[in-house]
Image (cartoon, rainbow, N blue to C red):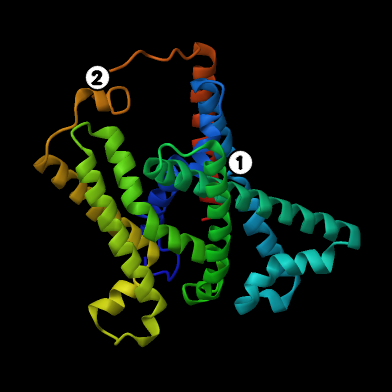
Amino acid sequence: MNHPNFPWTGIVFGAPILGVWYWCTDQHIVQRVLAARNVSAARTGTIFAGFLKILPVFIFVLPGIIAAALYADIRGGSADAAYPALVTRLLPAGFKGLVLAGMLAALMSSLASAFNSCSTLLTWDVYRKLRPDASEQRLVAVGRITTVLLVGLGLLWIPFMKYISPQIYIYLQSVQAYIAPPIAACFLLGVLYPRLNGTGALAALWTGLVIGTARLVLELARGSLASGTVWTWFATINFLHFAALLFALCSGILIAVSLMTAPPSPARIAGVTYGAPEIAAIPVPAGPRSLNIVLSVVLVATIGVLWIVFR
């Protein structure tokens, strides 16, 4: 439980919050589901993505174990050099190029999707509402300018990454822990509880934004904080524990504010919230539905086996 990076309590209670935010609400991911032919294809695609997500266990973990077994200088503080060491020391010249080309292609694909999603959201959900009469050419130009600005902001942020964690994976998980909880709370509870409304959601989102930003700022400045204070605890608490606590706080605010304000109209929640009035059902073929259930069971069982093997 006191593991500095991945305590079991954080894995059980905090990591799923990050997963719900990323896989269920991130436009980078959701845009793939929205492109599916029908509901059945979308379900099958998400299950297939679950199987693909198992591959990082073998892509990240096993090469690290192999590198530690082969090279003594990789163990301990040089563990981050495991993958480059395997590529540079084991692969011949031609395969080195292929591996690097594959890594760069994957990186460029991910960055392109992320920048495209950000520019789309800012253009359509912000600029288009401020300028509803804007032409298509204007919207395209705004999207391009937004992408350039995002690239610049990303480059400016790089020097600050090391102050959160020198390991890129832990850095990514840490930053996501400051963003995910309020969004995951609004999504999960919004699907499950029809009494919630937009006022409560905005209150939860603003609360999560303020507290998450405060955590990020204090973590960057934790070297100058006095030890033993509440600010030091706030800046140094494990990021997964922080995600679980922030999720609970945002959920409480979401429910409390929603109950103190008017409920949403039935038309606004029809077909999108459990327990709400239904709309015209979208037929799903019986065959693919049964196959999806079987594949889901196999996926859960596979994850359980891997958890036991690699625990």
Residue kind at label 1, given as amino acid type = Leu
Disc 1 versus disc 2: distance between alpha carbons? 36 Å
- Report whether 66 appears left or right of 210: right
Image location (x, y in percent) of residue 282: 42, 15
Q: Residue at x 48, y 77 (%)?
A: 163
Please give the label number shown on residue 15.
none
Q: Which residue: 19% across, 50% down?
A: 253
The residue identified by callout 2 is 277
Q: Which element is circle 2 on?
A: loop
| Crowd around label 1: few <14 · some 14–19 · many ≥20 (10 Å) | few
- Which type of secondary structure does the marked residue at label 1 adopt? helix
Q: Residues within 10 Å of mark 2 (few under 14, many from 20)?
A: some
> Marks 2 and 1: in contact by CB < 8 Å?
no
Q: Nearer the viewer, residue 95 or 110?
A: 110
Does residue 303 appear in this view?
Answer: no
Inspect the image, locate mark 2, and give the three-letter code of the amino acid beneath it.
Answer: Pro
Task: Identify the mark at residue 52; answer none if there is no mark.
Answer: 1
